[in-house]
Image: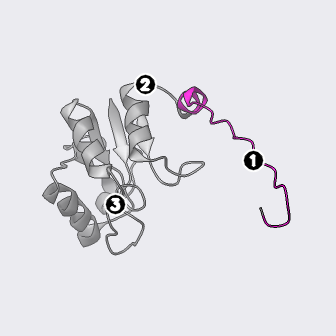
Amino acid sequence: MIIAVDFDGTIVEHKYPEIGRERPFAITTLKMLIEQRHRLILWTVRKGHLLQEAVDWCKERGVEFYAVNKNYPEEQVENGGGYSKINAEVFIDDCNLGGIPDWGKIYQMISEKKSWEELYHAAPVEEETPKKKKKGWFW
């Protein structure tokens, strides 16, 4: 599967132009997806040295992307690496409607091929325990 992954706010907390702290389990999940032979594309608005910083940050943690801001490594992108349309089956981005789920749910959605709705409806519903009525003024 081809998966496009945003950087700021998705892999790391949003601190652009700086690099924020890693979001919990982002790198671990990306490594697992790469091990399962998914093709990951880093898909970000970063350009120039800011883009290189993000690529290097991921590489230092063991995540190397199939391509960066393009569909495949050899693709020639016009306008100095502008924002070409990425052809991916899944986009992981903090700007999704409803925000970004935790990386455990993201992994579960991809590995089990389930939608967010399927996971949400499959989750057990916790019943609220009835509260005890107070008997007096102080308890």
Q: Residue at x 81, y 50 (%)?
A: 133
The secondary element bearing badge 2 is classed as loop
Magenta residues span 117-138
Left/right of residue 3 with respect to residue 36 in the rendered view: right
* Front in this rendered view, residue 18 or 108: 108
| Mark found first going from the N terminus, 3 or 2 | 3
Foreground disc of the pair 3, 2: 2
For residue 80: magenta? no
Determine which residue is flagged by label 3. 79
Place of residue 75 in the rendered image (x, y in percent of width and height, measured from the top left):
24, 44
The reply to whether discs 3 and 1 touch (Cβ–Cβ < 8 Å) is no
How far apart are the alpha carbons under marks 1 and 2? 40 Å
| 47 versus 116 height, above or below | below
Where's the C terminus, which quadrant?
bottom right
What type is the residue that disc 2 sits on?
A: Lys
Determine which residue is flagged by label 1. 131
Badge number at residue 99: none
